[in-house]
């Protein structure tokens, strides 16, 4: 984070000054409801889908929920959270905490250098990001479930302080919103999509709530393996690498995505084959090898089941 941005974020706000003068967090500034649910209408200007504000320091922030999806980024220092009454979770500088609409949390007192920013984000803002990453991963599923209030994980914590592309993208988001840059909505939506894509590469740095299960990072790893190495991806190899049984990993993938690893891998290979059929002059036999199959008859059968036509008929249709 640039020193110019940090200087602006360090400024003591009128709310913080009232707290330093002996006051407390004013719930009425965040909600008109009896239950403490921070309302997006209190924090977002009319017509806007995303905003950013500095986290309130110098007092504990009482337990509350949100009517929106909140993303907290620690610029410096740390904050300590209890999410849904659970054990304390410390978010350190450079880390990202995603909180779904079903989560409630309280935050211990933050001091002067414990600077965090909260992104207040309405569900429709994530359309571009979800188009980029899909729903077959922990982050996409988290956003989709939070939008629909279908349950799932209450939070995702990415310990990504050492991942430079993530840090740069978050800084770009903050800069764009703080400076009210022209074309702000397009810039922030596309920057968020790029941020999500980078976070998908950080499966080993993900912590999730218990009801998401300890297998979140493993499942993201398996899905990334399908995406990046579909030709040779192997459930056995992933299980061996991370020291879990094949049955455990298989069950984790199925419970998380609703599909088996094999069916997800087959779908990815068929999609790649379809792209090669429509976009290249490679022979069908070469394409079969290119996507990782040796059994020609199996490929033909799987392709026809997915697209309803043979590979040759698909190519003819795509070429008009």
Image (cartoon, rainbow, N blue to C red):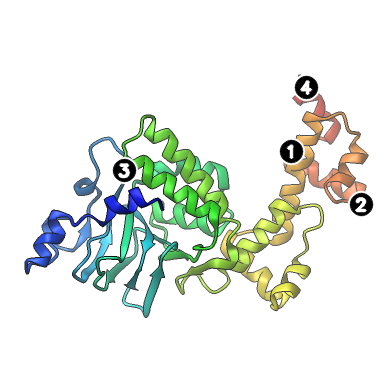
Left or right: residue 303 versus residue 227 is: right
Left or right: residue 117 versus residue 138 is: left
Is 148 in front, or is 143?
143
- What residue do we see at 49% from left, 49% from top? 168
- What residue do we see at 91% from left, 40% from top? 286
Mark 1 lies on residue: 307
Query: Mark 3 falls on what kind of element?
Result: helix
- What residue do we see at 34% from left, 48% from top? 4
Q: Which circle's residue, 4 or 2, is located before the other in the chain? A: 2
Q: Which mark is residue 294?
A: 2
Count of all numbered marks drawn on residues in the image: 4
- CB-based contact (under 8 Å), mark 3 and mark 4: no
Q: Residues within 10 Å of mark 4 (few under 14, many from 20)?
A: few
Mark 3 lies on residue: 178
Instruction: Name the residue at the front extreme.
Output: 3
Q: CA distance from mark 3 to mark 1?
A: 47 Å
Q: Which circle's residue, 3 or 2, is located before the other in the chain? A: 3
Q: Which circle's residue, 1 or 2, is located before the other in the chain? A: 2
Say which quarter of the image contains residue 91. Answer: bottom left
Q: Which circle's residue, 3 or 4, is located before the other in the chain? A: 3
Residue 304 at x, y percent in the picture: 79, 41
Say which quarter of the image contains residue 124. Answer: top left
Q: CA distance from mark 3 to mark 2?
A: 54 Å
Residue 287 vs 13, above or below: the answer is above
Mark 4 lies on residue: 319
Q: CA distance from mark 3 to mark 4?
A: 48 Å
Q: CA distance from mark 1 to mark 2?
A: 20 Å
């Amino acid at each position: 984070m640039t020193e110019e941005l940090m200087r602006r974020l360090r400024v003591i706000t009128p709310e913080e000054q009232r707290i330093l003068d002996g006051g407390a967090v004013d719930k009425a500034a965040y909600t008109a409801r009896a239950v403490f649910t921070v309302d997006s209408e209190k924090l977002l200007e009319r017509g806007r889908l995303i905003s950013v504000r500095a986290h309130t320091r110098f007092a504990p922030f009482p337990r509350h929920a949100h009517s929106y999806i909140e993303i907290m980024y620690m610029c410096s220092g740390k904050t300590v959270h209890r999410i849904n009454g659970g054990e304390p979770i410390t978010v350190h500088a450079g880390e990202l905490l995603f909180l779904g609409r079903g989560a409630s949390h309280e935050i211990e007192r933050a001091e002067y250098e414990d600077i965090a920013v909260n992104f207040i984000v309405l569900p429709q803002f994530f359309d571009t990001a979800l188009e980029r990453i899909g729903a077959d991963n922990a982050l996409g599923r988290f956003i989709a479930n939070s939008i629909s209030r279908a349950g799932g994980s209450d939070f995702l914590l990415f310990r990504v302080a050492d991942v430079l592309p993530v840090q740069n993208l978050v800084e770009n988001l903050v800069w764009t919103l703080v400076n009210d840059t022209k074309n702000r909505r397009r810039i922030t939506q596309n920057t968020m999509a790029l941020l999500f894509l980078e976070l998908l590469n950080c499966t080993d740095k993900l912590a999730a709530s218990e009801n998401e299960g300890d297998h979140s990072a493993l499942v993201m790893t398996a899905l990334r393996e399908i995406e990046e190495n579909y030709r040779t991806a192997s459930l056995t190899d992933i299980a061996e690498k991370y020291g879990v049984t094949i049955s455990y990993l298989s069950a984790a993938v199925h419970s998380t995505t609703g599909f088996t690893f094999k069916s997800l891998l087959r779908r990815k290979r068929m999609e790649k084959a379809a792209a090669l059929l429509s976009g290249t002059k490679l022979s069908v036999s070469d394409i079969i090898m290119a996507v990782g199959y040796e059994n020609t008859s199996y490929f033909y059968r799987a392709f026809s089941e997915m697209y309803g036509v043979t590979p040759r008929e698909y190519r003819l249709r795509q070429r008009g």
